[in-house]
Amino acid sequence: MAGLGVPESRGRAALGRLAEKAGRLKLNGHLFTRSPLSDVLELEAMRLGVEGKACMWRALQALADGGVRVDGARLHALLRRAERQIRILETLRAERSAQVFAPDVARTTAARRRSAARSPGHHAGRRTA
C-alpha cells in the first residue's frame, strides 16, 4: 500500500490488535488451554482476511484497467497468490473441522488415504488402470 501512496491506518491496526485480544476472552470452557475449535476459528478468520485482500487486489486491478498508473502485472500476481492462499486455507479448515466435529470420520478418512497411498498402482493421487 505504501507503494501506492496509501497511508497506514494506525486506528485500523489498533482495532485489529484489540479484536484479536478480545477474541481470546471468549468463554469456551477452555480458560487456560486452547479450545479444539480455536484452530477452526483462526483458519476461518485468516481466510476472511485473505478474501478481503483478494477483493482489494481486484479493485486495484480495475483501476489499472481504467488507466490509473498501477502495475497491473504485479496486481495480477498478488491476486493469484491470494487465490492460492484461499485454497490452502480452505483445505486446512475443512480438514480441521472434520477432526473437531467428526473425529471418528476424520480418522477413518485419513486411514483410507494412507492405505490408498501405499497400494500398488497409486501414484501422485491418481489410480492407474
Image: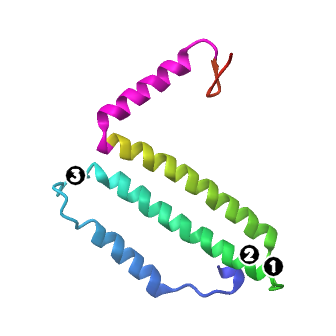
- Find residue 120 and report its image quarter: top right
On whether residue 120 falls in the magenta region, the answer is yes
The rendered magenta stretch, by its main secondary structure, is classed as helix
On screen, residue 63 versus residue 123, left or right, reads right
On whether residue 35 falls in the magenta region, the answer is no
- SS class, disc 1: helix
**Any mark on residue 61, and which?**
2
Look at label 3 and name its amino acid.
Answer: Thr
Look at label 1 and name its amino acid.
Answer: Asp
| Circle 2 crowding by C-alpha within 10 Å: few under 14, some 14–19, many from 20 | many
Task: Name which of mark 3 and mark 1 comes first in the sequence.
Answer: 3
Q: Residue furthest top?
A: 120
In this view, the mark in front (3 or 2): 2
| Circle 3 crowding by C-alpha within 10 Å: few under 14, some 14–19, many from 20 | few
Residue 15 place in picture, x, y as percent: 39, 81
Front residue of 82/119: it is 119
| Circle 1 crowding by C-alpha within 10 Å: few under 14, some 14–19, many from 20 | few
Residue drawn at point x = 77 percent, y = 68 percent: 74
Q: Is residue 110 above or below residue 29?
A: above
The Cα atoms of the two marked residues, 3 and 1, are separated by 49 Å
Magenta extent: 100-121
Residue that label 1 marks: 65
